[in-house]
Amino acid sequence: MLILPTASSADQKQRAQQLLASVAGQRLHCTIVVFGEGDRAREIASRADVRAENNAFRKVVWIPDVSVLAGDSVFAALMDQAKAGVEAVALTLRFQPSCCLRGPDAVDFFKLELAFADALAGKLLP
């Protein structure tokens, strides 16, 4: 699991954007991005990481402070999802939104598995 730094300084914000850009540019993984701080986000990230374990085509990125994405148009779709109350979003190999998770679905192992499968298959949000 990749945990992005918070925006405590301009350097940290830039580092977070670089790390996420490197994940987006690899085109090797379907990715579940988890938004937010605290126990709930930690639980979602941990459960998603269990589903990604031992699978070279899956990655989990936890963004505790979504403000690190502000100002970069590449991550505008992720910012929009976070602002809409989505707790996690699955992204395809091309880093396109495939599935949004919130509420009980975000911590359900089966729903997390389906999110990874849909993202790997290239299924996109309508």
Image (tube, rainbow, N blue to C red):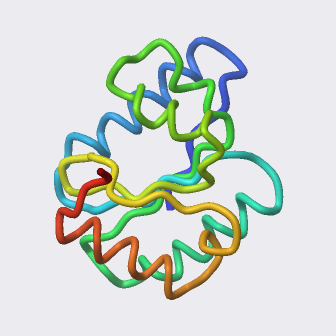
61 to the left or right of 118? right
86 to the left or right of 31? right
Number of dots carrying numbers: 0
62 to the left or right of 39? left
Question: 13 above or below 55?
Answer: above
Question: 104 above or below 96?
Answer: below
Figure quadrant of residue 64: top right
Figure quadrant of residue 21: top left
- Residue 27 at x, y percent in the picture: 17, 51
Figure quadrant of residue 18: top left
Which residue is pictured at 57% across the width and 25% down the height? Answer: 68
Question: 111 above or below 89?
Answer: below
Question: 66 above or below 97?
Answer: above
- Residue 83 at x, y percent in the picture: 62, 33
Which residue is pictured at 27% across the width and 46% down the height? Answer: 96
Nearest the viewer among 111 and 73 is 111
